[in-house]
Image (spheres, rainbow, N blue to C red):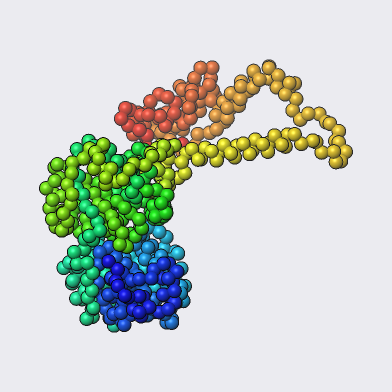
Amino acid sequence: MLASGATFASLGVPAPLVAVLDGDGIGTPFPIQAATLPDALAGRDILGRAKTGSGKTLGFSLPMVARLAGGRTAAGRPRGLVLVPTRELATQVHAVLAPLAQAMGLRVATVYGGVSYRPQITALQRRTDVLVACPGRLADLIGQGQCDLGDVEVTVIDEADQMADLGFLPIVRRLLEATPSDGQRLLFSATLDSAIDVLARRFLNDPAQHCVDPSSTPAEIEHHVITIKPADRLDVLAALAGGEKRSLVFTRTKHGAERLARQLTAAGIPAAELHGNLAQGARSRNMAAFGAGAVRVMVATDIAARGIHVDGVDLVIHADPPAEHKAYLHRSGRTARGGADGTVVTMQTSAQASEVRRLMREAGVTPHLADAEPDSEVLVEIAGPPVPRVTLTTKVTELVKPAERLAGGLGGRGAGAGPGERRGRKPRREHRASTDRAERTNRAERADRAERPARAEGPKRAEGPKRFDRAGRFDGAERATRGERAGRDERRAWGERPWRSGRAERTSGGEREQGAWAPGGGPRGEQGAAGRPPRHAGAPASSSGSWGGTTARSGYSGSRTVPGKRRNPGQGRHF
């Protein structure tokens, strides 16, 4: 329910910011905004709790921009810091902050992983006033000396409970310790458990506490639990996602989200994906496509369960029941945003019934129970009338190109790549197409050159005798004798090459040079037929065992020796 009688101007918001809000059609503050803005604008620390989608982003953006206006920022030393757990939330907070900051003459930049460092470093060096950051990438930039938090005046920790769940609290504590202790700090969370309480006691100075909607479960959401057979899971999901309502489907694993999106697309229900196996560019495009209505179904993991704001999500489907009640509440908070109604459906098998009952009890939810098959009327009541299916020309949705999937998507060579494609490269089909185009271009140029008329400039040269008269010079007889002449030249070369091993073999009769060459062109006793040396004839065979054994009678000292032994590679012919 909206706060009655309050306006942004009456709460102390500066006139330029009120004008920006009026331009966006935002005239009346939500309860969390009406509760926190007076204290935040006065400079007090804030500890706020409200359900997701309640307007917390404006609740901290307005006072931050108002308090930082008119100051001076040094390069690499921002004066405002917003810590968020996910890239998508950082992008959405930036989208809210940017027009407000521009109205007050401030600059905003985002810092998160999965993208290049260089643009983020460049933005910091251009005197960014407000930095929206994920803890891990910000810690990396501080370690590289590219960012310093010593001038931060206002610090915001958004979705603090999710940071605790993701294990970010140690990094968050180090980042808060790097900010001035006398700065203003605002902490917002959907739930305030023990870990958040410890963080608040450590870093907030006499905070003003504001809790809106203590149950954290909005009354506008209608909850359903349907029991299905495992074999009917995909058909029931298709019946729910194929209705007229805009749907967000949650799975437990990244691979499950990717597989389900492809299955729904193959069934004629185009579905986008959102999970950690996608590169940041693909995630941003999929979010934009879903937000703009290009696709009506998004299949996601819990990465989309916190802080991602998409207007008009009518139906949230838990294809896999979440592991804990907090995850259920955050998933369900993607619908019924801004005072609208919404529906949440949890699918379970009979084996999961006890787990789901415990989950609902801990979440404080009393759902409607039903058994469902793919053609059940209860599915039509929940999802609305079915819309016509779409026949696609490709096997999977083209919202995500295979080359943009991160390594490790499915494992092995086929991870994130279709037939004929390799990760990080263009598909072979595109490569062949580009090659064909180049070949056609070259063929056309050659044909054009062939059709050009001969140049008429200058006198023609008198024709002389042809350089090669193949018919006269290389007649048949010459070709027949050419091979014999080459063979004689080869034998002559072998016969004239001396053997200069420098080794001598002592015998009882005195010394003689080892491997003396016979007039026939080969070593004594090893001449082949017609005085030609055998194939591979070279250095003389030795019986002295210099290669590690008695050399086989092949006429070449480098041949295999006694079975099991080979010649020493350190020795050989010396020419």
Q: Position of residue 519 (x, y in %)?
A: 54, 24
Write the residue at 44% across / 28% down. 556
Residue 279 in view (yes/no): no
Residue located 57% across and 36% down the image: 436
Residue drawn where x is 64% and y is 38% of the image: 442
Q: Position of residue 31 (x, y in %)?
A: 28, 70
Q: Residue at x 11, y 48 (%)?
A: 354
- Residue most extreme to the right: 459
**Left or right of 131 on screen, residue 484:** right
- Residue 205's place in the image compared with 228, above or below, is below
Relative image position of residue 334 (x, y in whole percent): 29, 57
Can you say whether 329 is above or below 125 in the image? above
Specify the quadrant that holds the N terminus: bottom left
Asked if one can make out residue 217 in the rendered structure from this viewpoint, the answer is yes
Q: Residue furthest front?
A: 5
Give whichever of 196, 480 is nearer the camera: 196
